[in-house]
Structures are given as structure tokens and as C-alpha cells.
Amino acid sequence: MHEMINELECCPVIAAVKDEGGLKACLKSDSSVVFVLYGDICNISQIVDIIKKSGKYAVVHMDLIQGLGNKEISVDFIKNQTRADGIISTRPPMMRRAKELGLFTVMRFFVIDSMAYENIQKQTAAVCPDVIEILPGLMPKVIRRICQTVRRPVIAGGLISEKEDIMAALKAGAAAISTTNQQVWFM
């Protein structure tokens, strides 16, 4: 899965898709990694197949797929029934199971107060995800601090809408940014 991290170095903008329109648009973008933020157990396999056929990596946000529970067996479902390269989740048990199954892991954190710093460090040390994603991504000081303490590649996501946002996040130490804003995918 280090190849996905290498891809992020080449193209640090991750297309995060939340509907069919976004899925179609991301296929035309230079983004080599796609975060899937929608779908259900009936169509997630087809969504992933479309992404994979375009030569891109597909990373499924487990917490947002309708019909999947919050139990580890849901990760087995994604591994066995789709061709997804990895998962995103806020739940440590999901991360642990995905790592056991050899999937790329993105642990998502919402940085809403100072207690979040301790939580990020504690959970990252316990779970060892491949990368972490912090939201909102418009906080260079926070990104810098987390990059210095976590020792994992950091993805900045949420509310990124301009080239300056991308540059500030990358300058602060983020390995990549993720956004549903389609205009950003083509900057």
C-alpha cells in the first residue's frame, strides 16, 4: 500500500465523491486516489469497479455506506465483495480489521477542540493506520502540530475550496488533501 502513498506525492489532490455526478467527474480528473463517500451494500461493488476500471485507487468510507453496520464483518464484506484498495473510518475496530485483511487504512478525525489532539495521538498509536485524515482541513497550525506528533502521513479534508487552501495544507506538512469540490480536482 506504500504505492498509494507514492501516488499521493505525485498528485496530492484526492477526489472525494458523494454522488453519481461526482463519480463521473472524478474519472476525468488527474486524481489517482478516490474516496467513496456514498453508496449502499447493493451498489458499492459497482461504484468501486467503475473507479478501478479507470485505473484509480478506490478507498471506501465504511461509516457512510448504507446497509453496512459498525462491526468488523463489514470490512470483510468490502474486502470480499468489492475490489476496494482501502477503507476510511472513524472506528478503531474497523481499522484493525482492515489492516488484518491487508487493506489500506485511513482513520478520519474531526478536530473540534484541544482534547482532539490527545485522542488522535492515542488512537493512532493503538491502531497504526496507514494515514490519518483530519477535518476540517483549513487549519495549517493544527496540521503542522499533528504532523509533528503523529508520525503518519496526514490528509487534510473538508472545506478546501481554493488553490491557496491546498498549498497551505501541504506547506504545513499534509501529504495530500481530500475534497468533494470538483473545481479543486481540476486545479
Image (cartoon, rainbow, N blue to C red):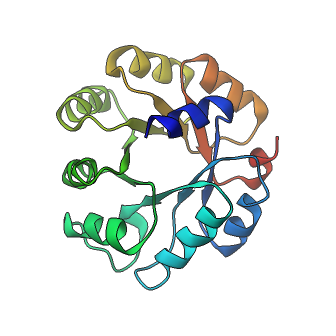
Residue 111 in sight from this viewpoint: no
Q: Position of residue 30 (x, y in %)?
A: 75, 46
Q: Quadrant of residue 121?
A: top left
- The residue lying toward the viewer, choosing from 173 and 112, is 173
Q: Is residue 133 left or right of residue 67?
A: right
Q: Is residue 182 above or below residue 171?
A: below
Q: The C terminus lies in which quarter of the figure?
A: top right
Q: Position of residue 21 (x, y in %)?
A: 72, 71
Q: Is residue 119 above or below residue 18?
A: above
Residue extending farthest top:
148
Residue 105 in sight from this viewpoint: yes
- The residue lying toward the viewer, choosing from 85 and 95, is 85
Q: Residue at x 45, y 55 (%)?
A: 85
Q: Residue at x 26, y 54 (%)?
A: 101
Q: The N terminus lies in which quarter of the figure?
A: top left
Q: Position of residue 5 (x, y in %)?
A: 51, 34
Q: Residue at x 39, y 13 (%)?
A: 148
Q: Quadrant of residue 112?
A: top left
Q: Is residue 154 above or below residue 60?
A: above
Q: Is residue 164 left or right of residue 118?
A: right
Q: Is residue 113 left or right of residue 162?
A: left
- The residue lying toward the viewer, choosing from 161 and 48, is 48
Q: Residue at x 21, y 48 (%)?
A: 96
Q: Is residue 72 above or below residue 14?
A: below
Q: How many marks?
A: 0
Q: Quadrant of residue 167?
A: top right
Q: Position of residue 72 (x, y in %)?
A: 20, 63
